[in-house]
Image (cartoon, helix red, strand yellow):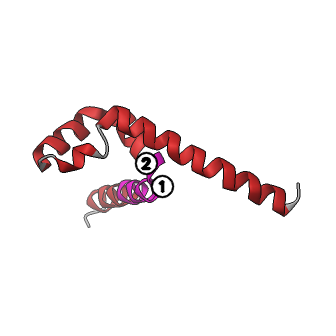
Amino acid sequence: MKLTTLTALLFIIIPIAFNVTFFLLQRAFEYPDILRKPTDYILKHFKEGGASLRGRNSAFEPREAGRQACLERSRRVEGLSENFGG
């Protein structure tokens, strides 16, 4: 496949994928209207959304997926250091 063809496909696929994940996040979490609500309300609904909502959020915002992976890794490292007297 030529580079120009691949680039063209990416220019088509990425916006569609972004819009699909935005739509799913809207349906599951009242996004973006929920951002006008009090923080307690937002956090309560985010917690109630569970893993599926976090997955949708991570798909919508790839940086969030990276941040979650880093947090999980640091938790594992903290657990190891506690086991070894750190």
Picture residue at 23% right of the left edge, 49% below the top: 35
Occupied quadrant, residue 64: bottom left
Does the residue at mark 1 contact the one at mark 2 (Cβ under 8 Å)?
yes
Which amino acid type is shown beneath numbered disc 2? Ser
Work out which residue is located at the far bottom of the displayed protein and give it: 86
Picture residue at 30% right of the left edge, 37% below the top: 29
Which amino acid type is shown beneath numbered disc 1? Pro
Q: Which residues are magenta?
A: 58-72
Asked if residue 37 lies in the magenta stretch, the reply is: no
Left or right, 39 with respect to 85, comes to left
What secondary structure prevails in the magenta region?
helix
Q: Classify 10 Å Cα crowding around label 1: few (below 14), some (14-19), many (20 and above).
A: few
Q: Separation of disc 1 and disc 2 at Cα?
A: 5 Å
Asked if residue 70 lies in the magenta stretch, the reply is: yes
Left or right, 58 with respect to 44, comes to right
Q: Secondary structure at mark 2?
A: helix
Q: How many numbered marks have been drawn onto this rendered protein structure?
A: 2
Give the x, y percent position of residue 71: 35, 58
Disc 2 target residue? 58
Q: Classify 10 Å Cα crowding around label 2: few (below 14), some (14-19), many (20 and above).
A: some
Disc 1 target residue? 62
Q: Secondary structure at mark 1?
A: helix
Give the x, y percent position of residue 22: 44, 43
The front one of 4 and 69 is: 4
Give the x, y percent position of residue 51: 36, 36
The front one of 57 and 31 is: 31
Give the x, y percent position of residue 48: 23, 33
Picture residue at 26% right of the left edge, 67% below the top: 86
Left or right, 27 with respect to 15, comes to left
Please, is residue 8 above or below residue 53 in the view?
below
Occupied quadrant, residue 40: top left
